[in-house]
Image (cartoon, grey):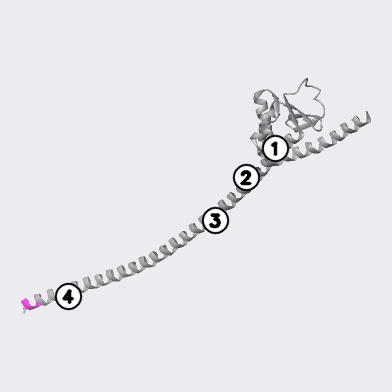
Amino acid sequence: MKRSTLSHSLLNIILVFIESAMTLLLRLDPELRKAAYPLAKQNTVVCLRLYLPHVEVFATFSNKGVLLDASLPIDRSEPDVIINAYSIQVLNALTTHDVETTEKLQMRGEVVQVQLVKQFIMQMGVGGIIQGLIKKIKGSDKTKATDAEKQEKADNYKARIAEQQTQINTLTVKNRELETTVKELESKQKMLTITAIVAAVVALIAIIALFMM
C-alpha cells in the first residue's frame, strides 16, 4: 500500500514537470499551439496507457494548455482518445517526428480526434521543435536579407538622386550660359538695329541735302 502511494506521488511529480515543459513549449512554438487549438476547443481528453512501466496518464486539452493527471477528470466518464503503447514507442514518436512511427501507436477514438492527436504528437516531437527553430532561423535570415535588400535599394535610390541632382545642376549652369548668350545676342541685335536706323537717317539726310544743292 505504501509502495503504491509512493509510486502515485512520484508519478504526480513527474507529471508536474512534464506539464510545465509542455506549457513552455506551447508558448514558444506557434505551430504546436496551432496543433493543440482544435483539441482544446473540444476539451479533448486523451488516455495514455503505457507498458513497461505500466502507467496510465490522462491529458486534458484546454485553453489553459495541456493538463496532465493520473486519473480521469471528474466531469468525464471516459476519454475521447485512448493510446495503448510501450513507453519506448511513445519516446520514439516524440523524438523522431516521423509519421510512420506515430502511426504505429495504437489509438482508439473518433477518427477526426485521433488524427488531431497524431498531428499534435508529431509537432510536439523533438523533430518538430528543431524544424520550428530552423524556420525561425530561416525567417531571421530572410529578415536580414530583406533588410539588406532594402538598404541596398535605399543606397541605389540615394545614388540616383545624387546623380540626377548633378545633372540638374549641370543643366542649370548650361541654361544660365545660354540665357547670357541670348541676352548678349539680343543686345548686339539692338545695337545693329540702332546703327542701321542711324545710318539710314544719315543717308536720307545726305540725299535730301544733295538734291537741295
The disc, 2 or 1, on the residue closer to the chain's N-terminal end is 1
Mark 3–mark 2 distance (CA, rounded to whole Å): 24 Å
First along the sequence among labels 4 and 3: 3
Residue most extreme to the top: 77
Q: Give the CA separation, mark 4 to mark 3.
A: 71 Å
Residue 59 magenta-highlighted: no
Query: Residue 148 versus residue 86: which sits nearer the camera?
Result: 86
Residue 182 appears at what percent x and percent y? Answer: 30, 68
- Name above or below for residue 147 compared with residue 193: above
Q: Which residue is mark 1?
A: 124
Residue 39 or 154: which is nearer the viewer?
Answer: 39
Q: Amino acid at mark 3?
A: Gln
The nearer-to-camera label among 2 and 4 is 2
State the residue position of label 2: 135
Of callouts 2 and 4, which one flags the residue occurring earlier in the amino acid sequence?
2
Q: Are marks 2 and 1 in contact (CB under 8 Å)?
A: no
Magenta part of the protein: which range?
208-212
**Residue 151, labelled with which disc?**
3
In this rendering, which labeled residue sits more in front, label 3 or label 1?
1
